Image (cartoon, rainbow, N blue to C red):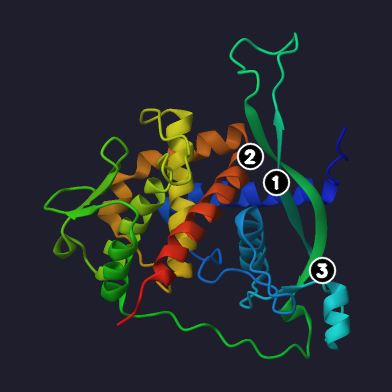
Amino acid sequence: MGKETPKRVIDQRMEVVSGIVEAMKEKGLRWFSGLGFSTAPRNPLSGTVYRGRNRLLLSFVASAKGYEDPRWVTFSQARDAGWKMRKGARSSVVEKWKMFSFEKGGDEGESEDCDPGAVVRFARCVGYWSVFNASEFYNAPEYLPEQLDDDAGRIADLLIRSSRCPVHESFSDIASYYPDSDAIRIPLRRQYVSNGVFARDLLHEMIHSTGHPGALARKLCGRFGDPDYAFEELVAELGSLFAASDVGLGLADMGDAHYERHVAYLQSWIKVLEKDPDKLFQAASLASVAADYLAERFQALPRE
């Protein structure tokens, strides 16, 4: 039997879920504004860039506490580096998760739909660490923000070149990924108010495309309104936010018309998260893997 999850970890998770659901109710599809997604949280002393649920957790905490510095360190790391902590500083918890697998046997008690010999993979939390934001140390080296690339049109071109599936631009009302043909169809660039909005919409569909069996093999079934459909849309939403930061693209506002067309997604997300809060962190983990997949292909492109 695994160790019981510490109450502090459970409380932090619930605080994040409650805060994001509340932001969804108050801000609608602009729920992410102000939640610190523009730069991935990182540990400058170990070189770790926080992914998955930790990226979501620390981004939320940074927003809640007003931190503008994305750097996080453990107490011992800060002490060894000579950083002096401010009085009253409070830490946050990051979680280490690891994938495990086992082969199903044919023992009695297995459900009929279990395939004997099939390999089952599952994630388990194997550790917790307390980290402090660099703002809590009065002599930490100055943080120099990364400069975002302001050429959204160039980034959009590179994203299309790096896409694992064809991207077809044509006059239409909405962007979509089609799993059966493994292709993305997106409105013409001139139909968008800016290249940044076009690139954001493109990233959302590119995250969907990573779910194809030939890539990350997520569950891309279900109909609009189904929990599985809502969950995949949340993965794509979080993944596009993560990926926008990773490729140097700002979080352009998509415009009222876009948000009005997609408001039904919001209600389905809220319903899913209120029923099972851990779905938020499951979605964040899958979204982070998908964003990394896109970013690796993007960064691997030869630059002229």
Label located before the other in sequence (1 or 3)? 1
Disc sitting over residue 188 in the figure: none
The amino acid sitting under disc 2 is Pro
Which quadrant would the C terminus be assigned to in this image? bottom left
Distance of mark 2 from mark 3, alpha carbons? Answer: 24 Å
For the question of whether residue 274 can be seen, the reply is yes
Q: Horizontal placement of 208 versus 106: left or right? A: left
Tell me, yes or no, whether the two marked residues, 1 and 2, touch with CB atoms within 8 Å.
Answer: yes
Between 109 and 8, the residue placed more toward the observer is 109
Distance of mark 1 from mark 3, alpha carbons? Answer: 18 Å
Distance of mark 1 from mark 2, alpha carbons? Answer: 7 Å
Looking at the picture, does residue 267 appear above or below residue 30? Answer: above
The amino acid sitting under disc 1 is Met
Tell me, yes or no, whether the two marked residues, 2 and 3, touch with CB atoms within 8 Å.
Answer: no
The outermost residue toward the left is: 171
Pointer 2 residue:
277
Pointer 3 residue:
90
SS class, disc 3:
loop
SS class, disc 2:
loop
Measuring 82% from the left and 61% from the top, which residue is drawn there?
129
